[in-house]
Amino acid sequence: LQDVLVSNGRDVVKTDASGKWSLSANEDLLIFVIQPSGYRVPVNDSMIPQHYFVNNGSQKNAQFPIWKDESSSNEFEALFYGDTQARGLREVNFVMHDVVEECIGTQAKFGVALGDIVADDPELFDEISAGIGQIGIPWYYVFGNHDHDAGVKGNDGADATFVRNFGPATYAYEYGKVAFISLNNVFYKEEGGYKAHFTDDQIQFVEQYLSFLPQDFLVVLMMHIPIVACDNREQMFRILEKRQHTLSVAGHTHELANVFVDEKFGWQGEAPHHMFINGTVSGSWWCGIQDEVGIPHATMNDGAPNGYAIIKFSGNTYNIQYKAARRTVDYQMNIYVPDDVSQDALDTTAVLVNVFNGSEKSDVEMRVDHSGKWIALGQTTARDPANMKLFDRGKYLNAEVENKSLDNVFGWKMDFPSKSDHFWKGNLPEGLGIGTHRITIRTTDMFGNTYQSHRIFRVGP
């Protein structure tokens, strides 16, 4: 096939009329093909794309099989899992029962794991990828800071086990009118620890690849640590700023956030860059009290439930929907108001709403009862009240069982809940009669998705 792109993670070349290509290859260098739109590459038994080959220093030739994908379309969905972060097979099973099983039968064309696939135990890669493979769609993996080989000092070779299981940590593929680019932005320092950083090879790879890509494509950068944390993010920004349609997707923070990257981050583009920080499958690291089937509630530090994202692509546009694990897709918020309110305290009683995937571009309104008028709520920063109760209860229960294995009884201890800005607040209207009333919250997000939820409370004398 002609005009197919092939790369060594730094240089990008096109195949000629006979499908031939040539690249310099150092010892142990990975070579990969960039799957073009309308085609597909082979997958293994765990549905991991086999789009690469490892040069052993002596091979001179490599061939990549790709073939027409008759089901390919410019309208498609993809699943994005943040931080499955399994500690041992017990938590691998949490991943399977909490999110994987419900995704079987999905209409999505492929899925992506956004790093921290495991919790410092890369020997579990086989087990977790075999389980995720049961969904039955191709699944791509991004390298995270907990996926490294612990015995390796510095950055070279820190991803060796990842590479053996999943292939290159930096790669790209196309589907519809979208170019997906995976970047390992976890850089391990010789003295220990890591930082968020793009290597010179990655910068060159993205720049070269995008020079071949039509301007009307959407470019989606996939990485573990959010792009704004990278010490050399502005080098990547200079490349992205030349394009109109870009999105970056990351995990790592174990919270949900939509950040519009502007000049305060060093972005110089005409419009801000949208950075989506995905919620995590492991939530708050599989912490907290177990439910009736033995899975921790794992509520994230911002009060959002653990889960994953469904991103719908239409041409070069996208629509992000967050999906809470084992909940209906329209579960998008929690509403907080006292169950009982006296009439004289109505106008000073706050209604607080945690809209999990809300952003500064969301509209959130409240209506009390059927005939009440819609009241706009104001965005605020808050800690989730229910999450605070879970944290306090967890402290008490953990103290009660201090001589037992806490992870087998009540789950890992929670972190203190964090403040988040996907909260909205307003006061109840005055003049409500004594009796039972209903609050309806309506929110419309930046993509035009509208969700409603309700809360019942009572007014007393």
Image (cartoon, rainbow, N blue to C red):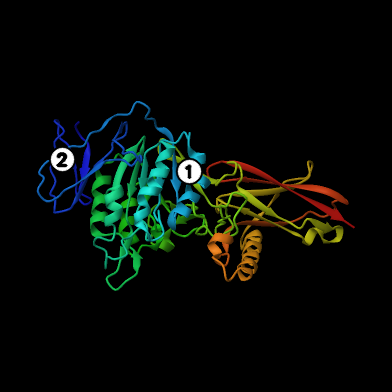
Which residue occupies the foreground of this view, 392 or 238?
392
Residue linked to disc 1: 100
Question: Along the horizontal axis of the image, is 195 left or right of 425?
Answer: left
Residue occupying the far right of the picture: 461
Q: Identify which residue is drawn at 24% across, 62% down.
A: 156
Residue positioned most to the bottom: 191
- Residue at 86% across / 57% down in the picture? 343
Residue 52: x and y, percent? 24, 43
At x 33%, y 58%, the residue is 185
Image coordinates for residue 137, horizontal then vertical, percent: 40, 37
- Disc number for residue 205: none
In the image, residue 455 sits, relative to residue 159, either above or below, namely: above
- Between residues 321 and 32, which one lies in front from this camera angle? 32
Q: Quadrant of the C terminus?
A: bottom right
Labels 1 and 2: the sequence-earlier one: 2
Q: Classify 10 Å Cα crowding around label 1: few (below 14), some (14-19), many (20 and above).
A: many
Q: Secondary structure at mark 1?
A: helix
Residue depicted at x 58% and y 71%: 402
Q: Which mark is residue 62?
A: 2
**Residue 38 or residue 103, whichever sits in front:** 103
* Disc nearest the viewer among 1 and 2: 1
Task: Please state which amino acid type lies under the numbered disc 1.
Answer: Val
Residue 50 makes an appearance in the image: yes
Q: Position of residue 51 (x, y in %)?
A: 26, 41
Q: Hey, what amino acid is under mark 2?
A: Ala
